[in-house]
Amino acid sequence: MENPVRDGFALANISVFLVVGVWLLHRRFALLEELSPRAQVVVVCWAILTCGVELIVLRGTLQRAPVFYIFTAIGFFVAAFALYGHVGVSLLSKLLVDTVLHPGDDGVERPRTGSAEALERLGDHGAAAREYLALARIHPADPALWISAGANFVQLEQPHEAAACFEKAIALLQSPGEALLIFWRCAAILQRESDGAARCTTLAGGFTHRFAGSREADTVAAWLEKVESGMFANNDPATVGRPGEKGNSAGDDMGLERLEDHPLEASDQK
C-alpha cells in the first residue's frame, strides 16, 4: 500500500457507502418507507461526494494501470446506481411533478388512496388494509391512513391489528376531539382481547397525559376510573363491553354515543 492512511480512509468510506445503500434499499422495498424530499437531497449529495472521493483515491492508487482504473470506475458507478438510484429517481420524479404538472401546488405530498378505496368498494378488505399500511409507511405522519387500515382490519375481524392501527392514529392526531373518537373505537376492540385491560390502561393514561386539561381527557379519566372499578378488578375485559353501548357500565353512565351512530363510523362504511 503506497499510502496506508489514504487507502484506509477510502476503505472505511466505501464500507459506509455500501452499508447505507443496502439499508436504504431495505427501507424502501422491504419496509415500504420513503425518505422525505430533504433527506433524499442529502443522500444524493452525499452519494455524489463519496463517488468523487473514491474516484480520486482510485486514480492515485491505479495510476499505473489505467485499464484497471476505467473498469473499476465503471463498476463503482454501477454499484452506486444500484444502491442509490431509486433515491435519485424518486427525487427527480417529485421535482418533475411539482415544477411541471403542478406548478401552483403548495408542495405538500399527499397520499394517493384511490386504489385502496377501490378495493374497499369491491369488498376486498384484506388488500385494502395492506394498501393503506403501505401508504402509511410512506406517509407515517398521516393519521387518516392508519384509521382506514384499522377500519378494514375490523371488517376482517382482526382486532389485534385494528387496535394497533388505531393506537398509532391516536398518537398522531392533534385534535383531542378526533382522538377521542378513535380512542373509543380502539378501547372497544381492546376490551375483547386477552391483554385488553393493561392496554386500555396504557392507552387511556397516554391520552390523558397528552391532552391534559381538555374536556376529552377528563372524559377518558372518568371512563377509566369506572372501568377499573368494574372490570379490571376481576381481570375480565369482556364484562364491561363496548364503550358507548347501552347496558355497559362504562359507556351508558357517561352518556356516550353508540359508535354505530357516529358520523365517523358511517364515513368508514362508505
Image (cartoon, rainbow, N blue to C red):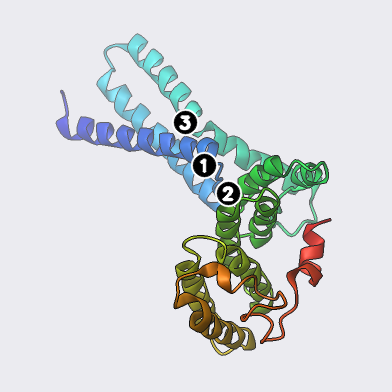
Q: Dot 2 surroundings within 10 Å: few (below 14), some, or many (20 or more)?
A: some
Give how far across and how far down residue 51 sits, in percent: 41, 32
Q: Dot 3 surroundings within 10 Å: few (below 14), some, or many (20 or more)?
A: many
- As measured in the structure, the alpha-carbon distance from the residue carrying label 3 to the one carrying label 2 is 20 Å
Q: Secondary structure at mark 3?
A: helix
Residue at 55% from the left image edge and 45% from the top image edge? 33
- Quick one: 195 or 72, which is closer to the camera? 195
Q: Secondary structure at mark 2?
A: helix
Residue at 15% from the left image edge and 30% from the top image edge? 4
Q: Nearer the viewer, mark 1 or mark 3?
A: 1
Provide the residue designation for mark 1.
Answer: 31
Disc 1 to disc 3: CB gap under 8 Å: no
Task: Report the quarter where the N terminus lies.
Answer: top left
Disc 3 to disc 2: CB gap under 8 Å: no
Q: Dot 1 surroundings within 10 Å: few (below 14), some, or many (20 or more)?
A: few
User: Which of the numbered marks, if any, corresponds to residue 83?
Assistant: 3
User: Which of the numbered marks, if any, corresponds to residue 137?
Assistant: 2
Residue 124 visible in the snapshot: yes
